[in-house]
Image (spheres, rainbow, N blue to C red):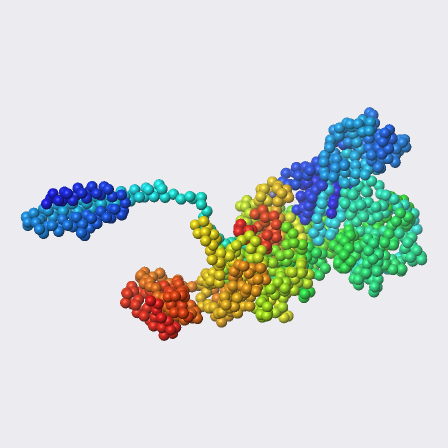
């Protein structure tokens, strides 16, 4: 009977050599190692043998089974590695074919800039304070030290509503009065807020000017707020917003609601201060108006200006976004043109 | 205002480069917007960046002062002459020229005194006088009508001074001139273009700028003489003044010049006026303009004889408000109806001029004027602003008076003006100034403790330094202990007598002159205000982020619209679903289609979709912005709304999947809204069939949070879509209120432990009457399934052959799970039985085989 064991072994090993894929390999296993396969058959023959031969035959069949199992595993590993090699070699795709278009979505560029502002000022303890857009003449002008017929009213062309005392705010500054009255507890508490939002001016719409635009105004009130604090805070902002080594210049200017008043220039981040078309070859870009809160404004907000002081600043997010991205036309901002919005 | 450095140097020595001065002025608040160079080179100053100027730099060896000693006829050309120029060489140079202002000297022999002009030698570079565009030419010898010519006398255009090219430059004789000296030393100049903020009224003149420069450079200020030679009869008796509105006209002064001659001004005066952009007229008018710019006190000259004629004797100048229906023809040939607030200069016969703004035509200076009455007055700046607004007239005078001219100043103009007129035109000045000054302003003194300076600036400034700065600005300063007592100079109106405000005014002057760059940067050491969490800002931004993560783009629209536009949102015959109440209406709109503030975002969303449709088939947009709702006796409400719009295919076409994708519809939008609600952890919302008239009534829904409807969404009403020419594309929109979203968002929501037991999944299909909603069916399933039914997912809706008419099949994938134990088949079967039972009983549903 050992003859047939050898026969099964030879035949099995030979046919195993011929298996080329996992399908024929599975077929081979069924044929030789399956429940009704050749090895099982040999085990079935044990009973028919004389008692004396059974043990030896059984051992031989066991040995054959384990030999074939080992050979099978080796073959299986070989076929798998071949298949893997084949897949790696031939399963190549054209990686230059276009990607599946995903829909990305995006924030409006002004919102993005506002978030940057808010994050930087939040780190210095400034909270967002929202104020209204349709505003009283008194808050937009008079209480900010701009009484009727004040020359500085000419600087701002105003949209009035049909109620002559009500207008569209021309700047976020009326929010200063509201914040002082709302948060100052009768002029007894310090304040640090930023006031973001839409403002309006009755201007010709051109590539450089719009009838609506956003502003961010900052206001710090305390018993010991100094001009050096304003300089320090703005310098810190410029470092984070523009460049870690951004230089800042303060230039005397005039805003009725601050005194002293200053324009803030940052070293042109496009040319590094060497002069370029965008900075009109001055090396500086104007980024903010600022100053110490005017005593009259402090009074109108409920504070005693001989005890309290404060600083304020205002910036234009659209202008800064335009500078950063080289945008030539401010009209893009409210055009809602996806070709523009998809580029941020 | 244009400020020639040559003019400024009359009052202040400038030993620094002009570029550096420009930078100092700019940083001190007098913004130099532009620098124009005339002949002189631009200088590089370390730390100062300037645009490179492309002007003509005059060659010091080839562009020279020349003396035209004779003008000869050209032998072959009538229109050309030969100017014989002495430029310091041994022989005269013969220049062929067609200058119209030299033709008159032709063959007149030696000119005495000689004409000083600009002489360009061979090889000199000048602008081409005949070229429209700026073009440089270099002089080379050539024949001109048979005469060899290699040099020329220049026009202003050729030198880059102005556009004047009719004649050559003809300068006044000056004993200091030397033939052959560099022209740059005589006419070279730098002109600063300075922009003034409204607080700098005092600087709106050459002397005003010079004062600032003197303070900044810490040098002496040199004032011109205000003395005048008056050899005539006293002015008193020849004219009188009657001020009727001292508030509007606190001071009025007059001087009188008799027997003068009206003629063109000399070169120096014309040249200066031209440098600052003014057109020379005649010596009298030019002097009034000159002093307007030199001193900042606008003057007005009357023809005295015409006043005498009108009055029938010695005139009385009256300043008063107009009478009802009064009119005046002004110098610009406009007959003006005078409103109640326009202050007039008049005489007994009627109005003469708009005070401080513009003169009248009848009494103006003419060629034949012999006797000149010169007015200098002070006007209330608000009064002048009202006149400007009412009459829409802007003059150099009104520009100054509307900002404020201190009443101390006019008399100086009156004195210096009449003296200049006498020198230029001859004649005799009447003795004295007729000066009426009913309302002199009080002088302003402010006490400034040095501690306050240091505390507010955050910097140590010594008492001496602060006092010195104020003295440089011409304040009268006294020190009392640590307090600076400063009295404002009489040219300033901007220092407040309110002590705290006045201190701020002085503080600004000290900081500005010391330089803001000297103030250190510090970190706020002051008490930190209470910190709080700004929920509405956080949630608003989260709403934006959730929508962007779903592929939507944020838009921001004009807040302006028109009633007509918003009416387009309402189908014919339907009641509007827009917020009630009136619009906020703009009194002075930029355009008629932008005359109210919006009450809805839908209009903006649709307009955006229409304009983008030209370029994009698929759009996913949102806007989070205010709408404006008018309220009675209050400022309008400005609630934040959220608008969403989807249109176009659900997927963009792609090469592996080239079939056109289905268009986005109601369910896409519902998905966006539910993702938003999930992202805000808002549950307990529900829908009702849509009631918003702008939407398709069958394909829209109202969203409820609690009992409150917070907005609507759905497919656009077909009639509305057609009006926006969007009928071809399916458009779905939403408009929600943001405040309820903020109110209902869950700031803290519990996260249950993740189950470790396996879930059992199974599908069931229920056949129900076709008019049952999916919502009803799901509610019954969930209720019957109880705690262990974790998820119900509808995966198929079927109507057709395999089920009876009037019915539909809804196929659900159900997930059962118990966190505490593994569910057996038996447990699952029990739940399933309950669900099927409830569906049979409550929905008359059959299990689909
Ligand atoms: Zn630059």
In the rendered image, is residue A192 in sight? no
Q: Is residue B383 above or below residue B420?
A: below
Residue at image point 82% right, 62% down: B321
- Where's ligand 1: which quadrant? top right
Residue B350 falls left or right of residue A222: right
Foreground residue among B414 and B783: B783
Tally of marks: 0
Q: State the image coordinates of residue A214 (x, y, percent, origin top left).
A: 60, 56
Q: State the image coordinates of residue B401 (x, y, percent, origin top left).
A: 77, 54
Q: State the image coordinates of residue B182 (x, y, percent, origin top left).
A: 76, 32
Q: State the image coordinates of residue A300 (x, y, percent, origin top left).
A: 64, 62
In the rendered image, is residue B240 in sight? yes
Q: Quadrant of the C terminus of chain B?
A: bottom left
Residue at image point 85% right, 34% down: B79
Residue A300 falls left or right of residue A118: right
Return the residue found at the far top. B90
Residue at image point 65% right, 64% down: B585
Q: Determine which quarter of the picture holds residue A126.
A: bottom right
Q: Is residue B466 above or below residue A307?
A: above
Residue at image point 55% right, 51% down: A339
Foreground residue among A325 and A242: A325
Foreground residue among A274 and A80: A80
């Amino acid at each position: 009977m050992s003859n047939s064991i050898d026969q099964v072994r030879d035949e099995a090993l030979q046919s195993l050599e011929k298996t080329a894929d996992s399908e024929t390999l599975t077929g081979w296993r069924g044929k030789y190692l399956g429940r009704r396969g050749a090895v099982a058959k040999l085990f079935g023959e044990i009973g028919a043998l004389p008692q004396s031969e059974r043990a030896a035959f059984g051992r031989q069949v066991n040995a054959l089974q384990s030999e074939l199992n080992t050979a099978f595993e080796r073959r299986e590993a070989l076929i798998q590695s071949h298949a893997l090699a084949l897949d790696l070699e031939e399963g190549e795709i054209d990686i230059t074919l276009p990607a599946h278009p995903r829909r990305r979505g995006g924030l409006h560029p002004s919102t993005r800039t506002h978030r940057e502002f808010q994050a930087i000022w939040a780190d210095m303890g400034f909270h967002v304070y929202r104020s209204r857009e349709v505003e009283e003449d008194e808050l937009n002008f008079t209480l900010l030290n701009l009484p009727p017929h004040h020359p500085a009213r000419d600087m701002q062309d105003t949209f009035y509503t049909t109620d002559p005392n009500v207008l569209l705010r021309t700047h976020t500054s009326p929010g200063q009065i509201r914040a002082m009255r709302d948060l100052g507890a009768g002029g007894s508490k310090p304040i640090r807020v930023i006031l973001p939002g839409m403002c309006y001016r009755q201007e010709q719409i051109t590539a450089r000017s719009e009838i609506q635009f956003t502003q961010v105004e900052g206001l710090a009130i305390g018993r010991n707020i100094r001009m050096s604090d304003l300089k320090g805070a703005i310098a810190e902002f410029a470092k984070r917003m523009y460049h870690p080594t951004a230089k800042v210049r303060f230039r005397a200017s005039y805003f009725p609601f601050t005194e002293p008043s200053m324009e803030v220039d940052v070293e042109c981040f496009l040319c590094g201060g060497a002069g370029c078309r965008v900075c009109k070859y001055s090396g500086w870009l104007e980024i903010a108006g600022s100053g110490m809160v005017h005593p009259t404004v402090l009074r109108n907000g409920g504070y005693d200006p001989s005890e309290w002081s404060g600083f304020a600043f205002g910036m234009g997010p659209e202008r800064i976004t335009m500078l950063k991205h080289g945008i030539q036309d401010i009209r893009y901002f409210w055009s809602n043109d996806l070709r523009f919005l998809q580029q941020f | 205002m244009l400020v020639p450095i040559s003019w400024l140097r009359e009052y202040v020595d400038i030993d620094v480069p002009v570029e550096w001065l420009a930078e100092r002025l700019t940083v001190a608040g007098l913004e130099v917007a532009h620098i124009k160079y005339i002949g002189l080179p631009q200088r590089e100053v370390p730390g100062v960046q300037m645009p490179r100027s492309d002007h003509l730099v005059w060659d010091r060896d080839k562009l020279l002062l020349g003396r035209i000693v004779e003008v000869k006829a050209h032998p072959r050309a009538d229109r050309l002459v030969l100017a014989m120029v002495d430029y310091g060489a041994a022989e005269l140079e013969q220049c062929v020229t067609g200058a119209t202002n030299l033709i008159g000297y032709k063959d007149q022999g030696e000119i005495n005194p000689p004409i000083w002009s600009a002489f360009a030698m061979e090889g000199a570079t000048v602008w081409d006088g005949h070229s429209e565009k700026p073009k440089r030419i270099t002089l080379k010898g050539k024949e001109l009508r048979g005469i060899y010519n290699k040099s020329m006398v220049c026009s202003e255009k050729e030198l880059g001074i102005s556009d004047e090219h009719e004649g050559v430059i003809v300068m006044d004789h000056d004993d200091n001139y030397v033939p052959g000296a560099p022209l740059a030393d005589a006419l070279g100049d730098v002109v600063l273009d300075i922009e003034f903020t409204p607080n700098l009224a005092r600087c709106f003149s050459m002397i005003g700028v010079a004062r600032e420069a003197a303070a900044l450079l810490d040098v002496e200020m040199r004032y011109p003489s205000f003395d005048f030679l008056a050899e005539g009869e006293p002015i008193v008796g020849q004219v009188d003044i009657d001020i009727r509105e001292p508030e509007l006209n606190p001071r009025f002064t007059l001087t009188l010049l008799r027997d003068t001659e009206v003629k063109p001004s000399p070169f120096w005066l014309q040249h200066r006026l031209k440098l600052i952009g003014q057109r020379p007229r005649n010596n009298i008018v030019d002097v009034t303009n000159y002093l307007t710019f030199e001193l900042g006190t606008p003057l007005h000259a009357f023809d005295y004889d015409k006043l005498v004629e009108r009055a029938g004797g010695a005139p009385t100048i009256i300043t008063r408000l107009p009478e009802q229906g009064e009119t005046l023809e002004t110098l610009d040939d406009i007959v003006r109806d005078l409103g109640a607030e326009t202050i007039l200069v008049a005489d007994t016969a009627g109005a003469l001029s708009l005070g401080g703004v513009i003169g009248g035509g009848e009494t103006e200076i003419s060629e034949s004027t012999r006797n000149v009455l010169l007015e200098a007055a002070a006007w209330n700046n608000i009064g002048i602003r009202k006149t400007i607004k009412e009459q829409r007239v802007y003059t150099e005078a009104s520009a100054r008076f509307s900002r404020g001219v201190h009443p101390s100043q006019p008399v100086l103009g009156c004195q210096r003006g009449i003296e200049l007129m006498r020198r230029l035109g001859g004649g005799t000045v009447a003795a004295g100034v007729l000066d009426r000054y009913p309302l002199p302003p009080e002088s302003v003194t402010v006490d400034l403790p040095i501690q306050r300076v240091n505390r507010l600036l955050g910097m140590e400034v010594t008492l001496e330094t602060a006092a010195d700065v104020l003295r440089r600005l011409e304040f009268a300063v006294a020190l009392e202990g640590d307090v600076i007592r400063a009295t404002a100079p009489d040219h300033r109106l901007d220092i407040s007598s309110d002590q705290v405000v006045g201190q701020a005014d002085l503080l600004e002057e000290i900081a500005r002159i010391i330089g803001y760059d000297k103030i250190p940067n510090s970190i706020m050491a002051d008490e930190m205000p209470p910190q709080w969490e700004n929920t509405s800002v956080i949630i608003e931004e989260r709403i934006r982020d959730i929508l962007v993560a779903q592929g939507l783009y944020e838009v921001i629209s004009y807040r302006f619209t028109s009633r007509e536009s918003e009416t387009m949102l309402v189908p014919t015959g339907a009641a509007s679903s827009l917020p009630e109440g009136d619009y906020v209406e703009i009194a002075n709109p930029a355009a008629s289609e932008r005359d109210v503030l919006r009450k809805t975002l839908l209009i903006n969303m649709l307009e955006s979709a229409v304009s983008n449709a030209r370029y994009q088939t698929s759009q996913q947009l949102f806007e989070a912005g205010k709408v404006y709702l008018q309220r009675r006796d209050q400022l309008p409400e400005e609630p934040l709304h959220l608008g969403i719009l989807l249109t176009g295919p659900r997927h963009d076409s792609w090469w592996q999947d080239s079939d056109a994708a289905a268009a986005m519809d109601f369910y896409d939008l519902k998905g966006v809204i539910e993702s938003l609600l999930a992202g805000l952890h808002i549950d307990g919302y529900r829908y009702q069939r849509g009631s918003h008239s702008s939407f398709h009534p069958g394909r829209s829904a109202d969203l409820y949070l609690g009992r409150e409807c917070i907005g609507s969404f759905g497919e656009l009403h077909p009639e509305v879509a057609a009006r926006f020419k969007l009928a071809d594309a399916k458009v779905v929109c939403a408009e929600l209120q943001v405040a309820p979203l903020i109110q209902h968002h869950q700031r803290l929501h519990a996260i249950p432990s993740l189950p470790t037991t396996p879930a059992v999944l199974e599908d069931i299909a229920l056949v129900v009457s076709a008019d049952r909603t999916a919502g009803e069916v799901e509610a019954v399933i969930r209720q019957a399934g109880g705690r262990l039914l974790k998820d119900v997912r509808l995966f198929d809706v079927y109507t057709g052959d395999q089920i009876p008419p009037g019915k539909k099949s809804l196929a659900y994938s159900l997930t059962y799970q118990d966190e505490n134990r593994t569910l057996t088949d038996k447990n699952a079967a029990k739940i399933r039985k309950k669900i099927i039972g409830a569906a049979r009983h409550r929905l008359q549903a059959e299990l689909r085989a």
